[in-house]
Amino acid sequence: MCNMTFEETGGENSSERMESVAKALEEVLSSALPQGCITVGVYEAAKSLNVDPDNVVLCLLATDDEEDVALQIHFTLIQAFCCENDINILRVSNMRRLAEILGGVKPGGEPMDLHCVLVTNPQSSLWKNPALSKVNRFCRDSRCLDQWVPVINLPDR
């Protein structure tokens, strides 16, 4: 159900809302990381989506590297799968900030492939996170405005 007013869809509130959603996204990622609820990498994400799509609560795709055709094909397939399985999707700019939030390197010093990041539910219980609710509401509201894959810019700190 889309019950947004004109004031909620644009204007001065729009930049404040985007900043608020970006902060909520940072909070979601920061709290999911120590729980082991983050999957990074295009291929790892595809495997996780194939095995247990019901466990995925959010999919993040990079806005950088838009000239890489193979990567864009993967993104298109991941987006279609997420839409089909009611998984919220965000495009994220500022990969440097995303790397800072997620640690940026795998054990062994190898850099992470942050082109696709999945947030999953912890196995122990259903995750009730107000920041995740805010991000999910933003995704739902964006779909009401025909923005099926909204873009969020993570601000530098």
Image: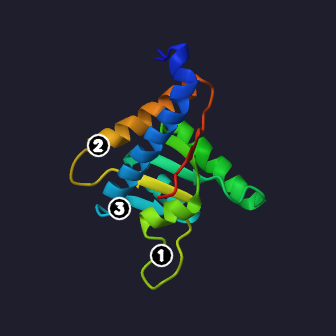
Relative to 90, say whether 41 is above or below: below
3D distance between C-alphas at marks 2 and 1: 26 Å
Image point 47% across, 33% down: which residue? Answer: 138
Relative to 16, say whether 94 is above or below: below
The amino acid on which the numbered mark 1 sits, given as a three-letter code, is Val
The amino acid on which the numbered mark 2 sits, given as a three-letter code, is Asn
Per the image, label 3 sits on a secondary structure element best described as loop
3D distance between C-alphas at marks 3 and 2: 14 Å
136 sits left or right of 92 in the view: left
Residue picked out by circle 3: 33
Q: Position of residue 147 (x, y in %)?
A: 62, 31
Residue picked out by circle 2: 129
Per the image, label 1 sits on a secondary structure element best described as loop
Q: Position of residue 106 (x, y in %)?
A: 46, 77
Image point 50% across, 21% down: which residue? Answer: 8
32 sits left or right of 109 in the view: left
